[in-house]
Amino acid sequence: MARERSAGAVREGAKSARTRERILLAAARVLSRKGYAGTRLSDVAAVAEVQAPAVYYYWTSREELLEEVVTVGQRATMEHVVASLAALPAGTPAMERIARAIAAHLEVVLGRSDFSQAAIRNAGQLPADIRERQLVGQRAYADVWRALVEDAVAAGEMAPDVDTRAARMLVLGALNWAPEWWDPERNPLEEVVAITQRIVRDGLRPS
């Protein structure tokens, strides 16, 4: 009897975890499309196919749920880019590492993750307290790109008179804006990646 109760508890726990994940996925989808101000828990519940009060079983507030979505999205982007860079062979030229980071960033924000889109699209809409907590992850990701740009300068693969901070911010700004205009039927992901890589290479390399 005790074993049956234990098995039942495991099944119930697994079901609860799946429901929580479904709600979180739904929140990412709604947030990425409607923005922070426009995301209502009733919309999230409808997409997740649960009753709206069920959301409060897992999160104490709308703000807590949406903050988790943004945190997951921020982490997903950084982890994919870092993993893609780590997979490159030792000695890969610095500019090719930047090109791989560009591809990885666009892959995750355009093709893989509502979470990443939600994080990028809503960075400027978050309440001050949530925004402050998110800055930790944003700074860590900025450090990845700072190292890439500085390595390119040190290797002589980037024009020495380029302001590295401006270059980094402009590249990231362009990458983060892509979800706002991208139409997969008009421009396949691979084409957008190739165009972006070419613009960055041609714009930053020594003349």
Image (cartoon, helix red, strand yellow):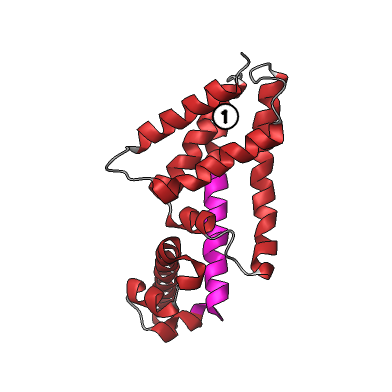
Q: Residue at x 54, y 34 (%)?
A: 101
Magenta run includes residue 18: no
Which of the 4 image quadrants contains residue 45? bottom left
Q: Return the x and y of residue 147 as percentages of the image width and height.
A: 69, 33
Q: Residue at x 58, y 58 (%)?
A: 123
Outermost residue, top direction?
207
Q: What stretch is highlighted in magenta?
A: 58-80
Label 1 sits on residue = 98
Q: Return the x and y of residue 206 as percentages of the image width and height.
A: 63, 15
Crowd tier of the residue under label 1, counting other residues whose Cα lies within 10 Å: few below 14, some 14–19, many 20 or above:
many
Provide the secondary structure element on which disc 1 rests. Answer: helix
Q: Can residue 88 be seen in this view?
A: no
Q: Return the x and y of residue 131 as percentages of the image width and height.
A: 65, 63
The amino acid at mark 1 is Ile
Image quarter in which the N terminus is found: bottom left
Q: Which residue is drawn at 58% across and 23% down?
A: 95
